[in-house]
């Protein structure tokens, strides 16, 4: 019987080689056991169950949840702080944007005010210049009138002196002392 099994194995082996297949010999080993009763899977499973039971008994899940809760609270506080900072930053950005807009408006208003002041100064200068020119013309006309009056007065004085000298000469040549006496007497009588 052993011979027939060996022959069958040899034939199967030769057929497999011809087909290009190789057969591996499967050997069965004995699995180790704890004290000969428990397979290794059971030992590892039991160890894990004991380890998990000790962790639950010592409060490991509670410590984990407290740690996670504290981290969650810290993250929430950081988020709230970030929201507050963002709101402050937005308020500052809006404030500075408003300041820039107001500064631009103020600059435009100042420029317009400066233009109006410049126009007012130019108009006042033109008015003052016209008044000065008018005063100077009036003063020149007054000086000319005064010079004319002085010239006419001087001419009259000279004419009067010349006329008096001529009259004196004529009277002296044409009238005598006796004729003057008669004229003086007539003038006194007429008074």
Image: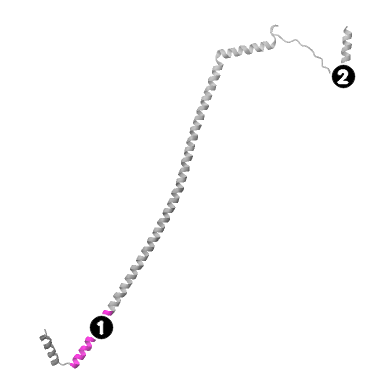
Tell whether 79 sits left or right of 136.
right
Q: Residue furthest left?
A: 189
The kind of secondary structure element at disc 2 is: helix
Tell whether 67 sits left or right of 5.
left
The residue carrying pointer 2 sits among few (fewer than 14), some (14 to 19) or many (20 or more) residues within 10 Å by Cα, namely few
Pick whichever of labels 2 and 1 is earlier in the sequence: 2
Q: Which residues are magenta?
A: 152-174
Q: Please tell me whether the stretch drawn in magenta is mainly helix, strand or loop.
A: helix
The kind of secondary structure element at disc 1 is: helix
Q: Where does the image place residue 35, in percent across and percent down from the top left?
A: 69, 6
Front position in the image: 162 or 32: 162
Within the image, what quadrant is residue 62 found in? top right
Front position in the image: 120 or 175: 120
Q: Which residue is mark 2?
A: 17
Q: Residue at x 28, y 77 (%)?
A: 149
Within the image, what quadrant is residue 21 found in? top right
Q: Where does the image place residue 76, in percent across and percent down from the top left?
A: 51, 27
**Residue 118 counted in the magenta span:** no
Q: Which residue is mark 1?
A: 158
Tell whether 67 sits left or right of 37.
left
- Is 89 rendered above or below residue 175? above
Query: In the rendered view of the protein, which quadrant contains the N terminus?
Result: top right
**Residue 171 counted in the magenta span:** yes
**From mark 2 to mark 1, how far is it between C-alphas?**
171 Å
- Is 53 rendered above or below residue 85? above
């Amino acid at each position: 019987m052993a011979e027939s099994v060996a022959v069958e194995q040899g034939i199967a082996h030769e057929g497999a080689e011809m087909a290009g297949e190789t057969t591996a010999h499967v050997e069965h080993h004995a699995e180790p056991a704890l004290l000969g009763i428990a397979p290794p899977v059971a030992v590892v499973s039991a160890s894990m169950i004991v380890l998990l039971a000790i962790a639950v008994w010592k409060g490991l899940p509670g410590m984990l949840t407290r740690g996670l809760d504290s981290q969650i609270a810290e993250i929430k506080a950081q988020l709230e702080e970030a929201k507050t900072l963002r709101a402050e930053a937005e308020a500052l950005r809006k404030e500075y944007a408003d300041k820039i807009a107001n500064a631009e408006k103020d600059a435009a208003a100042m420029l317009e005010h400066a233009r109006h002041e410049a126009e007012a100064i130019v108009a006042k200068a033109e008015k003052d210049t016209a008044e000065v020119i008018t005063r100077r013309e009036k003063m020149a006309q007054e000086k000319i009138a005064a010079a004319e009056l002085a010239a006419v007065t001087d001419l009259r004085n000279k004419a009067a002196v010349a006329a008096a000298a001529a009259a004196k000469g004529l009277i002296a040549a044409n009238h005598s002392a006796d004729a003057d006496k008669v004229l003086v007497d007539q003038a006194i009588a007429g008074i």
